[in-house]
Image (cartoon, helix red, strand yellow):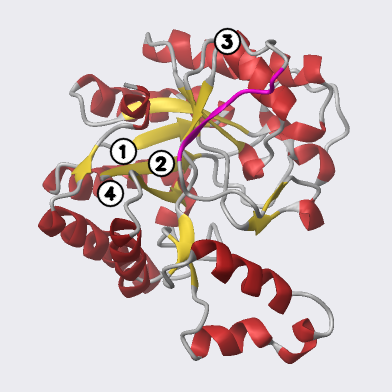
């Protein structure tokens, strides 16, 4: 098993769909988290939005880490602040999958070329902002030479937020093919790690989905199932789970013989007050502690860390 850490490296403006005027103060906080990664020989993949990729200080910091071999730089497209701006901004169009194919391509290409020019690399790894993946996005990614996508969140349905239904995907990596021979090459998908503490993920997901349907939803059945340890859905993310839960999921993934663990979070969570997950300075320390707890577990268990792009090999 390999550990991958993928970080949505983005602007400070959580929940805002402003095309311009975005700040990137949180990027300075990457220095501290990178020290933690270095301590445990973890090489994270920083997936950059356009405001980060066009900020000189952010590029200088991240390029320094990249050039000493400490990380990978990839692409994270927020369509609302990635030019060209031809669509009406708002929640629906914040999902890349809802934009016309040619506009998707223009935005991804613009960000791709910006990262290429600022870092002197060809980025190979990609994640959609807000998990807004579609088959057409994948076709556009292959046109630009991407090798890996990490936009799938297993057992999760985003349709209430204008996004895709990913509730039938598992944490297993796979190659995207659409059966129409119009993908330039198969694109490897490394999903974010979302799973269950119970051994049978498929059965647990079925029960979890049923518990969310009316009339069970009004009785908070999901909370009861979690409390009774009958169905425990866990994200490998310090934003969603504490260290104990992430370690329990890691152990379950090992027992179920999965190939990868893919921890995910946002750079903006490193700075208190920017996201709902970290509100105070004390929360910042707790957040870093959650990450370190899991890194200690992975190190003690002998789980090697790799960059996302290395999974293609």
> Which quadrant, please, contains the C terminus?
top left
Q: Which residues are magenta?
A: 173-179
User: In the displayed structure, does residue 296 sit left or right of residue 281?
Assistant: left
Q: Do the residues bearing badges 2 and 4 touch, measured as CB atoms within 8 Å?
A: no
Q: Secondary structure at mark 2?
A: strand
Residue bearing the label numbered 2: 6
* Percent x, y of residue 286: 32, 70
* Percent x, y of residue 211: 70, 78
The mark lying in front, picked from 1 and 3, is: 3
Graded by Cα atoms within 10 Å as few (under 14), some (14 to 19) or many (20 or more), the crowding at tag 2 reads many
Q: Nearer the viewer, residue 104 or 35?
A: 104
Graded by Cα atoms within 10 Å as few (under 14), some (14 to 19) or many (20 or more), the crowding at tag 1 reads many
Label number found at residue 21: none
Residue bearing the label numbered 4: 33
Verify whether residue 238 appears in magenta: no
Which residue is found at the position 34% from the left and 47% from the top?
Answer: 29
Q: Do the residues bearing badges 1 and 2 touch, measured as CB atoms within 8 Å?
A: yes
Which residue is found at the position 42% from the left and 71% from the top?
Answer: 197
> For the residues marked 4 and 3, what is the alpha-carbon distance in whole angstroms?
31 Å
The mark lying in front, picked from 1 and 4, is: 1
Which residue is found at the position 30% from the left and 32% from the top?
Answer: 307
Label number found at residue 44: 1
């Amino acid at each position: 098993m390999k550990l991958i850490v993928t970080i949505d490296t983005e602007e400070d403006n959580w929940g805002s769909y402003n095309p311009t005027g975005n700040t990137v103060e949180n990027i300075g906080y990457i220095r501290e988290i990178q020290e933690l990664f270095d301590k445990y020989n973890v090489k994270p993949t920083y997936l950059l939005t356009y405001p980060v990729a066009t900020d000189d200080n952010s590029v200088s910091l991240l390029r320094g880490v990249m050039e000493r071999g400490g990380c990978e730089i990839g692409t994270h497209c927020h369509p609302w602040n990635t030019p060209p701006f031809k669509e009406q901004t708002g929640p629906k169009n914040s999902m890349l999958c809802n934009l016309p194919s040619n506009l998707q391509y223009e935005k991804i290409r613009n960000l791709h070329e910006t990262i290429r020019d600022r870092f002197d690399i060809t980025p190979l790894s990609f994640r959609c902002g807000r998990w807004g993946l579609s088959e057409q996005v994948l076709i556009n990614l292959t046109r630009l030479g991407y090798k890996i996508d990490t936009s799938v969140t297993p057992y999760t349905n985003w349709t209430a937020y204008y996004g895709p239904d990913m509730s039938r995907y598992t944490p297993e990596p796979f190659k995207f093919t659409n059966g129409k021979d119009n993908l330039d090459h198969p694109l490897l998908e490394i999903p974010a790690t979302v799973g269950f503490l119970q051994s049978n993920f498929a059965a647990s997901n079925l029960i979890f989905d049923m518990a969310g349907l009316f009339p069970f939803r009004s009785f908070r059945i999901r909370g009861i199932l979690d409390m009774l340890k009958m169905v425990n859905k866990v994200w490998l993310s310090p934003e969603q789970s504490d260290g104990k839960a992430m370690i329990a999921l890691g152990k379950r993934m090992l027992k179920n013989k999965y190939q990868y663990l893919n921890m995910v979070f946002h750079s903006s969570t490193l700075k208190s007050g920017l996201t709902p997950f970290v509100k105070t300075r004390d929360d910042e320390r707790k957040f870093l502690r959650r990450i370190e707890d899991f890194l200690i577990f992975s190190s003690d268990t002998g789980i090697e860390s790799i960059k996302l792009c290395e999974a293609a090999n």
